[in-house]
Amino acid sequence: MSRILGDLEAAIMDRMWSYHRPATVRDVLEDLRKEREIAYTTVMTVMDKLHKKGLLKREPASKAYLYETVSSREAHTAQVMRETLASGGNQAATLVHFLERLTPEEAAALESALRVYPPGSRR
């Protein structure tokens, strides 16, 4: 299941990740309205879809739901990368093309990550 997000889904998830706390549809709506005109029902529908996709969890709170992210932005991005790699055909070739395109900063981040979690430590 691909977890690449549409534009509005990404905007909502960006806000949810930035809050570091549960939020209602109204909270997200008010935040989004600082940048665009958008209907409550639109935000509610997209947040419901994000819940059904497993990206948001929710609990009833009075007449509304309180939504919270299921995982961090970084964990979500890693999952998207993993799913993309798994669906890309020749994984070794895909990784070579990926590595060819890394900036020096990205290469340094990869090297740091490999020091934290070296290849031999995987199960």
Image (spheres, rainbow, N blue to C red):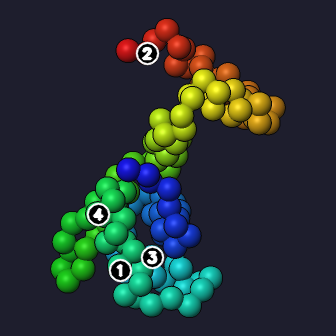
Q: Which residue is mark 2?
A: 122
Task: Estimate the x, y position of residue 113 in percent, counting from the top left.
Answer: 60, 25
Q: CA distance from mark 3 to mark 4?
A: 18 Å
Q: Earlier in the sequence, mark 1 or mark 3?
A: 3
**Three-letter amino acid code of the residue under disc 4:** Lys
| Nearer to the camera, 41 or 15 | 41
Q: With respect to residue 12, does 123 lie above or below?
A: above
Report if the CB atoms under discs 1 and 4 are less than 8 Å apart: no
- Foreground label between 2 and 3: 2
Q: Earlier in the sequence, mark 1 or mark 4?
A: 1
**Label drawn at residue 52:** 4
**Three-letter amino acid code of the residue under disc 2:** Arg
Q: Which residue is mark 3?
A: 28
Q: Earlier in the sequence, mark 2 or mark 1?
A: 1
Residue 37 lies in quadrant: bottom right
Q: CA distance from mark 2 to mark 1?
A: 40 Å
Report if the CB atoms under discs 1 and 3 are less than 8 Å apart: no
Task: Estimate the x, y position of residue 52 in percent, counting from the top left.
Answer: 29, 63
Q: CA distance from mark 2 to mark 3?
A: 39 Å
Q: Earlier in the sequence, mark 3 or mark 4?
A: 3
Q: Earlier in the sequence, mark 2 or mark 3?
A: 3
Q: Earlier in the sequence, mark 4 or mark 2?
A: 4
**Three-letter amino acid code of the residue under disc 3:** Val
Q: CA distance from mark 1 to mark 4?
A: 12 Å
Q: Which residue is mark 1?
A: 44
**Three-letter amino acid code of the residue under disc 1:** Met
Task: Determine whether, in the image, residue 64 is placed left or right of residue 109.
Answer: left
Residue 7 lies in quadrant: bottom right
- Does dot 1 land on a helix, a strand or a loop? helix
Question: Is residue 75 visible to us here?
Answer: no
